[in-house]
Image (cartoon, grey):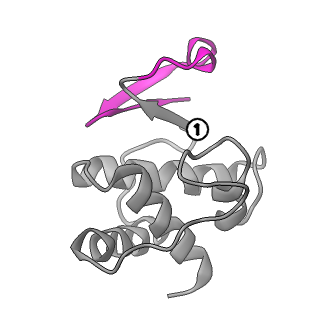
Amino acid sequence: MDSEKDCLARAVYYEARGEPLEGQLAVANVVLNRAASGRYPASLCAVVRQPAQFSFVRRGHIPAAPRNAAWARAVGIAHVASARFASGLSSNVLWYHADYVAPSWGRRLTRVTKIGAHIFYS
């Protein structure tokens, strides 16, 4: 797997491994949408490493993922999502957060959907 898909798979794993398949794909699509938007870096790894964007990233470091069933699923989702076989979200969906937090930036955006424990915005 190339480094870009690895970064995407780690984002799926650390942000959404306990979510339903649709939720994991949605998280992957937000990362892909950001990279394609022109508002964020074009590299998936750079999108994931951006400061204060993903809670699992510390000082630009993406932790290694354990080699378990959830990781294997995240890798598969990264492959499917990066091929754009299954999206479910429009390309302007660039943000999400867990449903148990209420970040102030969410009030400025348009809520698109809730999937599992995440709320997605455009």
Q: Residue furthest bottom?
A: 1
Amino acid type at mark 1 = Asn
Tell me where residue 96 appears, x and y as whole percent. Answer: 49, 34
The residue located at (71%, 66%) in the rendering is 43
Q: Tell whether position 112 is magenta.
A: yes
The residue located at (43%, 26%) in the rendering is 112
**What residue span does the magenta drawing correspond to?**
101-122
Q: Secondary structure at mark 1?
A: loop
Q: How many marks?
A: 1
The residue located at (46%, 72%) in the rendering is 83
Tell me where residue 56 appears, x and y as whole percent. Answer: 53, 52
Q: From what the image shows, is residue 15 above or below residue 102?
A: below
Q: Tell whether position 72 is magenta.
A: no
Q: Is residue 108 left or right of residue 88?
A: right
Tell me where residue 79 appears, x and y as whole percent. Answer: 41, 75
Q: Which quarter shows the C terminus?
A: top right
Residue at numbered disc 1: 92
Q: Nearer the viewer, residue 49 or 116?
A: 49
Q: From what the image shows, is residue 76 above or below residue 60?
A: below
Q: Nearer the viewer, residue 6 or 114?
A: 6
